[in-house]
Amino acid sequence: MTAGKVWLDYDQRQLDDQYDQRVLVPDANDYMARHLELSERVRAGHPCRLDVAYGPGPDETLDIFPTDATDAAPVAVYFHGGAWTRWHKDYNSYQAPAFTSAGVAFVSVNFSLAPAASLDGIVGQCRAAVAWVHANAGTFGADPARLFVAGHSSGAHLAGLMAVTDWPAEEGLPADAIKGAVLASGMYELEPVRLSARNAYLGLDAAAVDRLSAMRHLPGRMPPVVVAYGGGELDEFRRQSREFAQALKARGDACRELDLAGLNHFQVAELYADAESDLMRAVHAMVGVEH
């Protein structure tokens, strides 16, 4: 008997594999170990403010990497990946020099992880972090009117939700609080995630999928968006990115789509640390700083 289709042309095992990065990148933990080592070096060798609280919870902290500017620097708020269940801001300092060397302050956000935290709770923490940066940007030489978000993988899902958030309703911020979003290898429609093995720890129902899918909450006008994905990614991650980019372009939103030939999921993440990469060139162009 042929297994029934669960999503598109995938049966259950195939769909589960499409949301398991280790199917294509079995050495994923090696990337993470390297990122931690590189991040420790960056924190030791660059000006930074570490473990700054943006909320009352023990996980609600962020690291700030300012520029040499005394004021009015743009600021990028970064959300890490890890399938919402793994990693930490401490693995995500290594990207900072590629931002600060171009005059962009870099903020790496920590948040609680599933399954101890719900995805709604994680999204709420991320919104609180953005609100904190908006309110406190001046204390580290940044301009709250030049606030951008970025992320990779599940962090791109979170950054995508930040880009579509109704900020006046959620945090009392200006509607255009987010001036741009850089989304690498993310997920923007959570129905296939709900149908996959990932839902064993996310516990999404149809209502949560609706609340937490950026694709379903596009505002009247999106801020500029960069959508990036690798040629060596899982097909579902490539489809998610392509369809999100296509939806934005069809609406007339400013969207730059980067299909990065040959790169796997974790290699795409590392482009954030390479000031000469196509991804960071797109970041610099969006933010309006010289490359």
Image (cartoon, grey):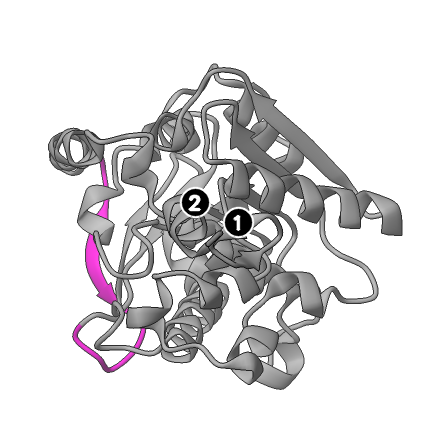
Instruction: Return the x and y of residue 198 as percentages of the image width and height.
Output: 35, 62
Tell me: 82 left or right of 78. Answer: left
Discs 2, 1 touching: Cβ within 8 Å: yes
Tell me: 148 left or right of 15. Answer: right
Q: Residue at label 1?
A: 10
Name which quarter of the figure residue 226 lies in.
top right
Give the number of the disc on residue 18: 2
Q: Residue at x 56, y 66 (%)?
A: 191
Q: Which residue is drawn at 45% across and 59% down?
A: 137
Check if residue 32 falls in the magenta segment: no
**Closer to us: 236 or 226:** 236
Give the number of the disc on residue 96: none
Mark sitting earlier along the chain (2/1): 1
Amino acid carrying label 2: it is Gln
**Dot 2: within a 10 Å radius of its alpha carbon, few (fewer than 14), some, or many (20 or more) residues?**
many
Q: Residue at x 65, y 80 (%)?
A: 168
Residue 252 shows in the view = no
Instruction: Return the x and y of residue 202 as percentages of the image width and height.
Output: 35, 72
Check if residue 53 falls in the magenta segment: yes
Q: In this view, does 165 lie above or below 34?
A: below
Q: What stretch is highlighted in magenta?
A: 44-58
Amino acid carrying label 1: it is Tyr
Q: What element carries label 2?
A: helix
